[in-house]
Image (cartoon, coloured by chain):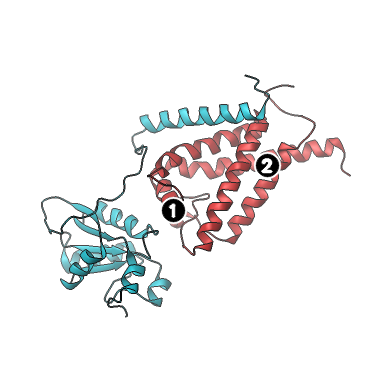
Amino acid sequence: MNIGLPSVQVFVLIVFSSVFSLFVNGVRTDGIPLLAKELDVADNIEITVDEPQLLAITLEQAIDLYKKGTVFIDAREPEYFTDGHIMGAWNIPFFFELTFKLDSLQGKDSPIVLYCSADECGSSEDLAYELQAEGFTNLYVFKGGWTEWSENGHPIGP
Amino acid sequence: MISLKQRSVLVLFSRIVLGVVLIAASIDKILHPEAFAKIIGNYNVLPFGLENIVAIILPILELFVGCCLIFGVMLDGSAVITAGMMCVFIIALSQAMIRGIDINCGCFKVSVENGGSHIGFRRIVEDIIFLGLALFILNRGKRKWELYPKT
């Protein structure tokens, strides 16, 4: 192998970085799994307080929860929220304020639905993990989000 | 026309600038792999949960390549990898902007609260400049101030 060749150098650098980084990830305490895990999709929604759950839900399941008066949280930036959102949803950019309001109004074990723009956005899932870390136990991420909800003519507005 | 010596100095300057940028960009990502994986996931360009493995390898690659550029180790390979990374970043940023998804850039800092930025036109321009520097290093001609391999 002629190390003077750019292609050989690219190969050496990539292989060395890969091996080294995988080793470091393996030994560090906050290493991450090699493949990201998608959220499990809820089969049926049973509100339990026995074990914490964070699941993805479909439009039908979201409607079901909506009809039961579940709190919906809009995880998008406020300007998107102002343009349109699921009727009655909350949009509280300050995490502390959000957890305080949720905790004082309904406690940590009541169901919460989170959504953002559509399948492609990640903010609802990020916020769900943050809430889970704060001790909230019944978290549902409505993956279809604002796009699926509004396109299917469900209640929107202030 | 600039002289050969001036050109060598310019090449060294480009190497240091690009090297420092790459190292600076890698540190926060190395410290917070989970947050960086989520950012890559938000770009929605990688299938099958591959964002984690990219979040593990990419920052270390940036760090190594940055060091190699500064110290003149395997400079051709380092410049090719840098140019490749910049092309990928430019495409990822552009497609996210075209699709109108507002996400954290994940360019230098993994969290916006911590001084990071959202994606934007400025980031793309920066990456185009870095791409230019990498190509300039690749076409440097005379080899000077390089540690390995000696020619």
Residue visible at 46% across and 54% down in the picture: B43
Say which colour chain A has.
cyan
Residue at the spot of label 1: B44
Describe residue B29's horizontal placement relative to residue B136 as left or right. left
Describe residue A27's horizontal placement relative to residue A1 as left or right. left
Q: Is residue A51 above or below residue A118?
A: above
Residue A92 appears anywhere in the view: no
Point out residue A133 in the picture as x, y percentages from the top left corner.
26, 51
Q: Quadrant of the N terminus of chain A?
A: top right
Provide the chain ID for the residue under circle 1.
Answer: B
Residue at the spot of label 2: B134
Point out residue A100 in the picture as x, y percentages from the top left corner.
24, 65
Describe residue B115's horizontal placement relative to residue B87 as left or right. left
Point out residue A67 in the picture as x, y percentages from the top left corner.
17, 73
Say which colour chain B has.
red
Kindly indicate the quadrant of the structure image that contains residue B50: top left
Element type at mark 2: helix
Point out residue B13 in the picture as x, y percentages from the top left corner.
72, 40
Residue lying farthest bottom? A158
Amino acid type indicated by mark 1: Asn
Category of crowding for the residue at label 2, using alpha-carbon neighbours closer than 10 angstroms: few (below 14), some (14–19), many (at least 20): many
Foreground pick, B1 / A130: B1
Foreground pick, B94 / A31: B94
Task: State the separation of the CA atoms marked 1 and 2.
Answer: 27 Å
Q: Nearer the viewer, mark 1 or mark 2?
A: 1
Category of crowding for the residue at label 1, using alpha-carbon neighbours closer than 10 angstroms: few (below 14), some (14–19), many (at least 20): some
Element type at mark 1: loop
Amino acid type indicated by mark 2: Ala
The verdict on a common chain for dots 1 and 2 is: yes
